[in-house]
Amino acid sequence: MLVKLHFFDALADTEDMAGTKNKQDLLHEISGGRLVGGALSQLANYSELFSRMSEGVFLLDRNSHRIMECNPAACELLGLSEDQVLGKELSEVMKLTPEEEPALTGALDQFKTQSQYRFQHELEWQNEKGSQFFFEVTATSLKILDYIEVIQFIAKDVTEVKRAHRELREMNEVLRKLSTTDAMTGLRNHRYFKEVLAAVHAESQKFNQHYGIVFIDVDHFKKFNDHNGHPAGDEVLRKVGAILRETSRSQDLPCRYGGEEFVVLCRGSTLEETYTHAELIRSTIAATVFPFGEFQPLGKVTASIGVSAYPESSSVSFEEVLEKSDQALYHSKEGGRNQVTAYGNTQSGSNGASSIKKKSA
């Protein structure tokens, strides 16, 4: 059924005036008492389009922003009847956020002086039932008759699109986290560590900051697995991962590097500060009771650790800083294990290990 715009229905007979009188009175008030009539044949196509559009459409007075007409879709999205909408200002029927309401009002005010003004925006609001919606809105000038020009305000519901995009982002984040997390220990993995290390190195170069790397290797881990089985070895790795989480500061990033190797990225730490943190990790692992640990060559589960830092150990690249920590780790292994070795530039010994290189139980 064709629904005519009440706004243009100046020829309604007197028996139908009861339902349209208020709307026509509103029109007379806004148009300064001038009777709107004629040119209905020119408006017929728009009238049908207006009524059938799936988007909510409002016709607003340019000066007061009062709603002169709205289509059925507009009432549906607001959760209000036509009588509850007509004559109200747009801000009265749309419960916008405190940030968006003045922005919308300011944009609509532009139509008072700029007849060709047009704007598009995304709005968030709640209807009378408390449902939250997101809309893409478009406002343009619409000339109805020679002396009537209104704001055509179209609202397209994009709530489901926004929800689908949000769910897709959340799913992608879950997948990304899975791809960068070690399933056994729950720590971040080698891939994630390298990505963050590259970013921290670039930031440290730019702002002249420090960072340190603690490279950890569980001593005699192959022997442990061979004698006690892989389930027991997996439990050792999980416990070491938990120790790294417990001993790390909020700015540190503990990761499983691969196999029995772990790394900790210590943001904002000098070589000596990183060494101190590494010694805490070493002593905590050595003091922790692991099942079957008493059968290890050192009588308990221990770890050898290498430490490097930017810029003390290297200022060339993050790969080289990481390589220096690996070299220091090798020095700890060669020196008897259960030790911390720091790679630095002061009083270098063999392999570049500094005088603060070792500490053992």
Image (cartoon, rainbow, N blue to C red):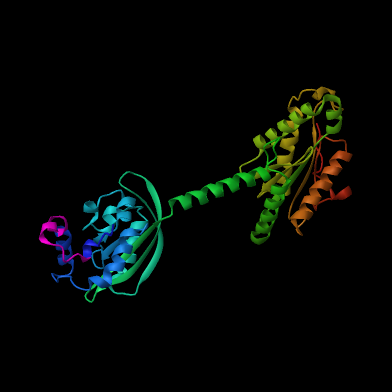
User: Closer to the camera, 41 or 25?
Assistant: 41
Asked if the magenta segment contains residue 10, the reply would be yes
Q: Residue shown at 24%/67% (left/top)? A: 63
Q: Is residue 211 left or right of residue 97?
A: right
Residue in front for this viewpoint, 199 or 164: 164
Find the residue positioned furthest to the bottom: 146
**Main SS of residues in magenta:** helix
Task: Pick the residue in front: 144 or 49.
Answer: 49
Residue 313 visible: no
Left or right: 349 as drawn, with respect to 313: right
Q: Residue at x 86, y 25 (%)?
A: 227
Q: Where does the N terminus fall, quadrant-wise?
A: bottom left
Query: In the rendered structure, which segment of residues is drawn in magenta?
Result: 8-20
Compared across the picture, whether 53 is left or right of 177 comes to left
- Asked if residue 190 is positioned above or below residue 49 in the image, the reply reads above
Q: Is residue 245 above or below residue 307?
A: above
Q: Total number of numbered labels?
A: 0
Expressed as whole percent of the image width and height from the top left, the position of residue 359 reads 80, 37
Indicate the position of residue 174 as horizontal and vertical percent values. Answer: 60, 44
Q: Can you give x and y, in whole percent of width and height, for residue 207 in the image?
A: 64, 59
Quadrant of the image containing the C terminus? top right
The extreme left residue here reads 14
Q: Residue furthest front?
A: 1
Above or below 267: residue 240: above
Against 171, residue 158 (above or below) is below
Q: Residue at x 13, y 69 (%)?
A: 33
Location of residue 30 by image quarter: bottom left
**Residue 357 magenta-highlighted:** no
- Nearest the viewer among 28 and 289 is 28
Residue 63 seen: yes
**Residue 284 drawn at (x, y percent):** 72, 31
